[in-house]
Amino acid sequence: MAAAVMRRGPAGWWRWHRRVAAMVCSRAMASKTPVGFIGLGNMGNPMAKNLLKHGYPVIAYDVFPEACKEFQDLGAQVTDSPADVAERADRIITMLPSSPNAKEVYTGANGILKKVKKGSLLIDSSTIDPAVSKELAKAVEKMGAVFMDAPVSGGVGAARAGNLTFMVGGVEQEFDAAKELLTCMGSNVVYCGAVGTGQAAKICNNMLLAISMIGTAEAMNLGIRLGLDPKLLAKILNMSSGRCWSSDTYNPVPGVMEGVPSANNYQGGFGTTLMAKDLGLAQISATNTMTPVPLGSQAHQIYRMMCAKGYALKDFSAVFQFLREEETL
Amino acid sequence: MAAAVMRRGPAGWWRWHRRVAAMVCSRAMASKTPVGFIGLGNMGNPMAKNLLKHGYPVIAYDVFPEACKEFQDLGAQVTDSPADVAERADRIITMLPSSPNAKEVYTGANGILKKVKKGSLLIDSSTIDPAVSKELAKAVEKMGAVFMDAPVSGGVGAARAGNLTFMVGGVEQEFDAAKELLTCMGSNVVYCGAVGTGQAAKICNNMLLAISMIGTAEAMNLGIRLGLDPKLLAKILNMSSGRCWSSDTYNPVPGVMEGVPSANNYQGGFGTTLMAKDLGLAQISATNTMTPVPLGSQAHQIYRMMCAKGYALKDFSAVFQFLREEETL
Amino acid sequence: MAAAVMRRGPAGWWRWHRRVAAMVCSRAMASKTPVGFIGLGNMGNPMAKNLLKHGYPVIAYDVFPEACKEFQDLGAQVTDSPADVAERADRIITMLPSSPNAKEVYTGANGILKKVKKGSLLIDSSTIDPAVSKELAKAVEKMGAVFMDAPVSGGVGAARAGNLTFMVGGVEQEFDAAKELLTCMGSNVVYCGAVGTGQAAKICNNMLLAISMIGTAEAMNLGIRLGLDPKLLAKILNMSSGRCWSSDTYNPVPGVMEGVPSANNYQGGFGTTLMAKDLGLAQISATNTMTPVPLGSQAHQIYRMMCAKGYALKDFSAVFQFLREEETL
Amino acid sequence: MAAAVMRRGPAGWWRWHRRVAAMVCSRAMASKTPVGFIGLGNMGNPMAKNLLKHGYPVIAYDVFPEACKEFQDLGAQVTDSPADVAERADRIITMLPSSPNAKEVYTGANGILKKVKKGSLLIDSSTIDPAVSKELAKAVEKMGAVFMDAPVSGGVGAARAGNLTFMVGGVEQEFDAAKELLTCMGSNVVYCGAVGTGQAAKICNNMLLAISMIGTAEAMNLGIRLGLDPKLLAKILNMSSGRCWSSDTYNPVPGVMEGVPSANNYQGGFGTTLMAKDLGLAQISATNTMTPVPLGSQAHQIYRMMCAKGYALKDFSAVFQFLREEETL
């Protein structure tokens, strides 16, 4: 290991030094090399904490300094830029809100690629356009490093509990190395294929989810107006061919199930604005690949209209409320 | 019973004769009063046969005499009109292709209501507009008889095997009487509420089914074009929130599952033209109750376009094929 | 003509007589035979007044007695039922809110058909399902009278000004007789073909109108967000292939045109709830004729959602406001 | 003006010089400085020829050498790359099929920007994503040159006849300079605002056009099935609020108008695949600006499905044929 440290120069040394110090207080840490983590927002924060819990020294960066503060207190090393992270860690996880952010963090003026070390493993868990993932992968590859896209399924709760699902795209022989880190944060790590297929799997799933959720809301609403009891209708759908996750696990009609956002005025859960964002990605991917997605496209428009009508921060199952007639004439 | 036979004339006699003969070989038949069956098409034919198998004498009628021939050979009594059936049976099941047919059979010039006996139980298993079911129920009620709507889920195969699902609407205290007959033809008989709710449950389920099927086809198609392996994508969807009956039990992509229509060039199954019909009923019910069904409505249009483009007789999962690009420019 | 008169019996003779008399002294009330008018609502009220202004004695009926009061003061004869109107007038105009109302007025217990005279001319200006118009026409014909559907285009303002457009369906040789009355209330009376085609023309026009209005709202909104000045964009569209009545005569964007509802907070004009009703009729006609109307169907859903979100009484061009983002996150 | 010239350096001077010279002898070729033209496809070919006809020496480039051959014969100077064009001309028009092509031509390894002279005027007539136009404008500006987007409306026929419409975005004080060239190729040159608004105007118009065309096809189809004569229905729509360019100038129903693609089996005109492309741009712009475009989005999907079903090369009014039922069951 000393050889490895030497090969890597001062940053390596420093890391080695930290490790030695850590050996004193943490049984596992000594054996683990640091992991960079960029993007400490709602999702990134608990994810990075789970890495710490599993004994990985974390080299942290976020564009908002206050987001880093907490990690400093937890013993993480906070840096000034993505480039600095790349200088000090050869495995980096990024968790960013959008394609432009991801481009900036990787290829910007102080981006990872300015100082990335050959052989580094860069894992992007952001949900972005798969075409952008491919672009980033090419740029990373030119620097002799490895890029994998690994978007997650599951919200803040799953991130805290460490049971996210990761959908991973990239070179297959690097998958095990990625999995080692990702299993600290998720209970399910699925290999999907070449770079970009992680994103593809995620946006396809979420597009189908949005469609079935709106479909469930429409069917439940129609049934109720035709005189059916909502619980009974849900039961019938769930034992028939209309059954779907939105009907049997996350029913959007208040009173049908316990412990879901519809039972709590659509608070918590997966925000309408986030669903609209994912549907936008699906839309762009479909446009670029000339794939007809008539319902996916309509679902996107409906969530977009909901955002314009005050539902942005409610759970996406609030589409039931949106479709329900609220007024009498 | 002899009196009844006399009252009914030669046909009655003949039936009585058959019954006597049957007593020899069938333990149960003697105790069973005849059941009328109107509409011996693709679905009605095996359903009526299952009644016979369970020992019910059947009084049959179909607008096409050739459809009755087979039943005559099986020992059923064939009549000349729905009114005749009503004269000879006080429990009648109807299985008809559309709302106008149902109106004709019940309220037409030679319809059931011309000769229906007080206290008769009339069960309509057709899939029709719930508003029409309610109209028929009112007309039946005026004659002192009972009407229940009991549309089925499951196709010709399920009808033959006797494991249809019946969704039943009508007065609750009559449900047991209906169930006695329906269990001869189905494995699942669900009470849904007042008259019309059987239809409502069915069209809500089928609308959600159509939406999830198209959504599954779109998501699978998009994923494939983005580089995902179809089997892997199906697996990912099925363990995630996109999961639905169309993805996990009836996947529309050839090669993903065995034993489904997509594995057999979309032959068999539930025809596109039948799905378009059910979506038309959902559409009309939604329009009449002023319920917004944006995706249900779009699904209807897509199946309507498919009918116009040669998919009418293919299974409704062929929407995958319809959406898939077939040509290169 | 005499032969035709004879064939029609007394009522026919009477009409012929009236025509001759009218030729002698066309402006005097004395020379005009009374016209029945059923349905004195927002539209019927000014329409019936225009008949009075043109010197026609009016035999009035409305289900709400207070709606008749004003007409009594104006010298019209008020009756107790549609049947009474039919007893006293052999030309009747009906203006009713929906298909069930029209059925009731024509074929109900005290309906027109109870006392209609042979040879009477019954003109229905309601906007209803063309299939219902055809049903009514059949029933009317059986009584030896003539039925025409003549829905109007133009709102309350046009009704007051007497410049409605009538789209008329029915036997062509009766068109002139209908036109004589309709020109008192409208500036444009168009013969469309067999019974039901008046309705068909109206709902096709309104469906296309709804589609272009939403399309105009979407295009204007998108252009504005992409940095275009709304007036300039409207000008460009109007000299290009995007031009339509909604863009050049009734632009939905506040500030682009004067004297339209968008210039007045979407007050007045053609209410969203009425547009939703007409789109419902288009939807039902399309479903019944198995015609794919993907955008018409979506337009219906959008106006339905608007009704549920507080836009019911605003002009239908308020769809611009509905689609516009109102909130920032 | 001299100050402005000085600020721009030699190329600016040269333009000023050219303008003075042009004033003396505007029709003679000698007095005109050369214009670069990149992209000599279906549209670029006749556009460049019109520049030649107006006496402008043309410096030509196309990625397919054979496309240049004809221009060599016409006296144009053919070059090896966009960079070469930029070296020899300080006014350049580009006419390219897509955003990636435009990026390559401007910012690629042998792109215009490699050798563009300060003060050059670069006009892009391609129809591309307005966001890409803005990106290109920034890159061009950095080199001290001026970029304008000027997409066209009108097809190959209008390009030949020199009566295209140009929608121009860019700095207003450069508009006159652009107009001088564009009027050689178009009869209508409209200033739309900042860079990107030319594209915005075009895609908004085409989105509305697509929506009204499909709407017209739906309304005509529905009317015909309800028994209306197509010509009569078109006449009624055109005098009513359903009127639009697609109904009154380019009616999609065969037999209604002469001289339009629907009268010629949908040959010629504006190809379905091109409409699908423009709708894709509208979709992407709407997604990026979070603008709900429910009908625009559905129109996109319909043209996409048509491309998949053999309509790619037919005029976009063939949507009437696509929606029309072709089969009987």
Image: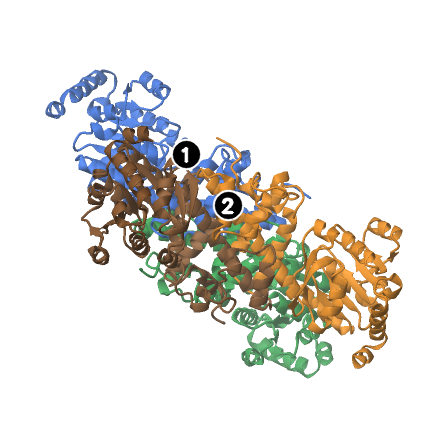
Chain colours: A blue, B green, C orange, D brown
Q: Where is residue A174 in the image (x, y as percent from the top left)?
A: 21, 39
Q: What chain letter is assigned to the residue under label 2?
A: C
Q: Which of B309 and D221 is in front in this view?
A: D221
Residue located farthest toward the front when viewing the structure as drawn: D24
Tell me: residue C259, above or below residue B65. Answer: above
Which residue in the protein does label 2 denote?
C235
Foreground mark, 2 or 1, reads 2
Please identify the quarter of the rendering in which residue C57 is found.
bottom right
Q: Nearer the viewer, residue C138 or A23?
A: C138
Q: What chain letter is assigned to the residue under label 1?
A: A
Give the CA separation, mark 2 to mark 1. Answer: 47 Å
Q: Which residue is drawn at 20% across and 22% down?
A: A30
Give yes or no for contact between labels 2 and 1 (Cβ–Cβ under 8 Å): no
Say whether residue A326 is left or right of residue C293.
Answer: right
Q: What element carries label 2?
A: helix
Callout 1, which amino acid?
Answer: Gly
Crowd class of label 2 (few under 14; some 14 to 19; many from 20; radius 10 Å): some
Q: Where is residue C323 in the image (x, y as percent from the top left)?
A: 53, 41
Q: Are marks 2 and 1 on the same chain?
A: no
Crowd class of label 1 (few under 14; some 14 to 19; many from 20; radius 10 Å): some
Which residue in the protein does label 1 denote?
A155
Q: Where is residue C270 in the image (x, y as percent from the top left)?
A: 65, 48
Q: Which residue is drawn at 80% across and 66% down?
A: C91
Q: Residue C310 carries which label?
A: none
Callout 2, which amino acid?
Answer: Lys
Q: Residue at x 36, y 27 (%)?
A: A46
Q: Which of D192 and B319 is in front in this view?
A: D192
Q: Where is residue C163 in the image (x, y as percent from the top left)?
A: 71, 55
